[in-house]
Amino acid sequence: MAYQALYRKWRPLTFDDVVGQEHITRTLKNEIMSGKLAHAYLFCGTRGTGKTSTAKILARAVNCLNPKDGNPCNECEVCRGILDESIVDVVELDGASRNKVENIREIIDDVMFLPAVARKKVYIIDEVHMVTTQAFNALLKTLEEPPAHVLFILATTELNKVPATVLSRCQRFDFRRITNADIVGRLKTILAGDGRKVTDEGLALIAELGDGSMRDSLSILDQCLGFEDRELTRDDIIHMIGIADDEALFRLAEAIAQNDGESALRVLDEVSSSGKELGVFTERMIRFVRDLLIVKLVSEPEKILNTSKEKLERMRAIAPELTKEKLIYALNLFNESVISARLSSFSRTIYELAVIKLCDPTTDHSYEALLDRIASLEQQLAQGAASSLPTKRAKQQEETSSSEKDELPPWEDIPPLPAEAPPEYADTLPCEQEVKPLEQKRQEEKSKQAEVPLAVAKWPEIISYVKMNGGMPIFSHLKKASVRFLHGKLGMVFDENAFMSKTVVSKPSNLELVQKAIRAVTGEEIQAACFSLKETGGEPAGEDPFAKLEALSKTHSEIEII
């Protein structure tokens, strides 16, 4: 007998065998037992979550001669015929290869005939999002009012590509990503049935690599079982699959947190020298950085992350060393490096360049790098470095005071100050009329600063939000604008050399996107408008983030590290 892959050999035969989708299987079992079946179902979700397996179980369950609590018996003549594909009343189609109008017309013509053996004709269309628009239109009428003996089951991994007219005619079920714990439990059952053993640490790694997909996890397990007949360990799996262990991920994250480019490059070199693919390692690093970001932003990350307690504790220890901006910057850089490496003959250089930029953002002039530098400086200043350490200016003043100390007379030789100033010095003292205007001016300056909205200070974050939410075409134009609060609006001011940028950003759809970004970043409801420098009277327009970085850098340069 020919060898079968594990995911085919151990495909679920009943609803109870489907892992991690109890919210769906329970509903389907109840519908079958009550006889209240829909005429069309749509199963959607990521790969390997059980969509096709559930569809095949449903096809047998509705036709089973001896159903058991909504499950097919898999022993009657009809169930066995469907399992060995000898019954033609259950048709499985691939939407990727049979997506033309003529293929759909075959179904439309075929549904008019009664089933040969089973109660219902069942049509399972996998990857239905690949069907052409014309073919969908041809199927709509039949899908809406099929004959009573027909059942449609559609499956897709890309729900957004399925027309709304099809969605409205189906009962939709969303398949969730399977948790690591559920995957490990299923793998243990399969291993017990095959008489093989894998350590718990090894199974946890396989589940992590499967990324919520049971089929991917079983494919990895299938590959590993061919390694040796003995019990497999985590190290065996790492060696077999060609991936780096978690220690390399943590070491690289620590090097990035310390801006240690040398250590970061050494990690990449060790990963590559050990025969691991840097592309696979970088993809794991992307998931790892994402997990670190979740740990940093979420109070109970264990409810979101599928990871062990030990790994979670280590992530909690390193997360405070990395700013939110640094992690976002890392995600963008690693994602871009993976895409660029696929098109390059020097992929290793691209990955190395990414970690160099992360460890030294001054080598990158992108907005993400700028935000990372600002956040890093603000974090250092907020930690009290400026107040706890003597600055160069303070040290100079201290040295000057020390040099002049010898020239001053002893304290006991200095006469006491008079209780009242002598009359001859009365003219040199500030009068009450002079003090009041100074205080009034100071209050006016504070009031003026309070009028500036948060959107001005958060402008770099606002345009980064625009870039990440469909505004990439206008991102380069927004970078040419400086901002200030004008006429109750956030004014984007362009100089005479940026006329084209002003024209592009002034489009209503683009202004609406900027206002959406303002709401998302600041929570303020502020309208955005474009102005030329001439319209503002030729005055400088707002705070420049690069100027803010320069000011922070200047402040930080005055801190003397002892």
Image (cartoon, rainbow, N blue to C red):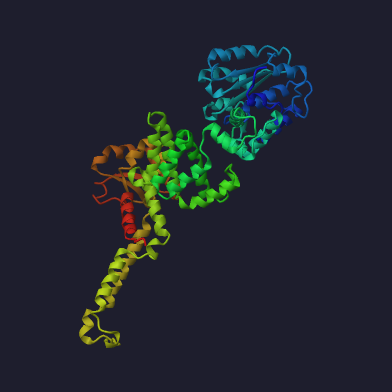
The location of residue 21, given as percent across then percent down, is: 66, 34
The location of residue 477, given as percent across then percent down, is: 32, 39
The location of residue 482, given as percent across then percent down, is: 31, 47
> What is the quadrant of residue 211 in the picture?
top right
Residue at figure coordinates x 58%, y 20% from the top left: 140
Residue in front for this viewpoint, 157 or 202: 202
Q: Which quarter of the rendering shows the N terminus?
A: top right
Residue at figure coordinates x 71%, y 33% from the top left: 26
Q: From the viewer's perspective, is residue 447 above or below residue 216? A: below
> What is the quadrant of residue 214 in the picture?
top right
Residue 430 in sight in this render: no
> What is the quadrant of residue 200 in the picture?
top right
Residue that extends furthest to the left in the rendered view of this protein: 424
Residue at figure coordinates x 34%, y 55% from the top left: 552
Q: Which quarter of the rendering shows the C terminus?
A: bottom left
Residue 367 in sight in this render: yes
